[in-house]
Image (cartoon, rainbow, N blue to C red):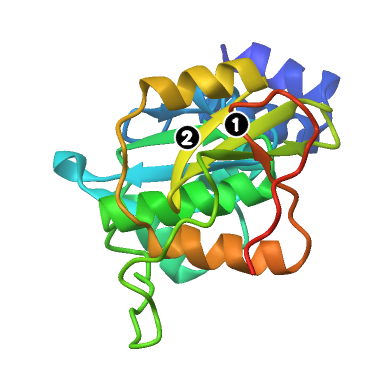
């Protein structure tokens, strides 16, 4: 083995050898049940993710336009802060969801934070100006489309009564998604995010109509 190792040094440049050894080692455990092979299956584009610690305790929810790259930077990045390193040391498993666009990632991230209450996230403060409820200004559920530039994949996001239902790859599947869902509560985060984007021209469509007829924005 020693002779082989010495010969290998003569055949392969040392920096290349170090890189390959590091990459091969990283294909094994990075944190808990997380391996490099597992991270290879994470979305390359937009999405959300959540880290879990011991006893499946939610630690951190995040979003990114490049989820796979962001997860690697959390767990193996060379320029991580001391806070990121402490977080990585607690991670035992990870979940993710592709969202097909950045706005969908924002809605899903806010929903997960409100639901899971992870310890490393700052829960948005509720102020006196935040409504506990708000009238739904549309006759039914609405949908908006996002398209990722890299893959050109389409995502249709469903919202009903200021509750983010999820997304599907077609209007027909979006309708099925809504039909199979349970009516959710008013989400202040969804209300705030959508109000901001509606003011900037977000285009909505009625979910029950598979046409390009936009829904009038609320006054």
Q: Which residue is mark 1?
A: 207
Label 2 crowd bin: few (<14), some (14–19), many (20+), radius 10 Å: some
**Residue farthest left in this picture:** 55
- Nearer to the camera, 187 or 75: 187
Which quadrant, please, contains the C terminus?
A: bottom right
Of circles 2 and 1, the one toward us is 1
SS type, badge 1: loop
Picture quarter containing residue 211?
top right
Q: Is residue 178 above or below residue 7?
A: below
Callout 2: SS: strand
Frontmost residue, 167 versus 123: 167
Quarter of image, res 142: top right
Q: Residues within 10 Å of mark 1 (few under 14, many from 20)?
A: many
- Residue 208 seen in render: yes
Can the viewer see residue 74?
no
Q: Give 151 or 31, whichever is nearer the viewer.
A: 151
Mark 2–mark 1 CB contact (< 8 Å): no
Residue at image point 70% right, 23% down: 210
- Residue 116 in the image: above or below residue 7: below
| Place of residue 169 in the rendered image (x, y in percent of width and height, measured from the top left) | 65, 21
- Residue drawn at 56 percent across, 54 percent down: 106
Picture coordinates of residue 116, whole percent (x, y): 27, 51
Q: Residue at x 42, y 68 (%)?
A: 83
Q: CA distance from mark 2 to mark 1?
A: 26 Å
Residue 165 as seen in the image, left or right of residue 147? left
Where residue 79 appears, x then y in whole percent? 62, 62
Write down the residue under mark 2.
Answer: 96
Q: Position of residue 154 (x, y in %)?
A: 74, 27
């Amino acid at each position: 083995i020693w002779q082989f190792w010495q010969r290998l040094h003569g055949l392969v440049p040392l920096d290349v050898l170090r890189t390959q050894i590091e990459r091969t080692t990283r294909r094994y455990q990075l944190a808990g049940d997380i391996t490099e092979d597992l991270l290879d299956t994470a979305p390359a584009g937009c999405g959300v993710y959540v880290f879990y610690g011991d006893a499946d305790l939610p630690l951190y929810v995040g979003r990114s336009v490049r989820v796979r790259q962001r997860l690697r930077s959390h767990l193996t990045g060379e320029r991580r802060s001391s806070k990121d390193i402490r977080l990585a040391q607690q991670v035992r498993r990870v979940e993710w969801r592709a969202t097909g666009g950045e706005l969908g990632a924002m809605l899903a991230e806010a929903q997960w934070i409100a639901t899971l209450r992870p310890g490393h996230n700052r829960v948005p403060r509720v102020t006196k100006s935040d409504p506990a409820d708000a009238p739904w200004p549309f006759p039914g559920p609405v949908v908006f489309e996002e398209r990722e530039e890299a893959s050109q994949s389409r995502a249709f996001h469903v919202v009903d009564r200021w509750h983010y239902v999820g997304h599907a790859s077609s209007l027909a599947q979006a309708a099925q998604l809504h039909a199979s869902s349970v009516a959710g509560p008013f989400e202040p985060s969804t209300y705030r995010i959508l109000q901001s984007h509606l003011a900037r021209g977000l285009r909505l469509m009625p979910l029950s109509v598979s046409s390009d007829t936009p829904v009038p924005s609320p006054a």
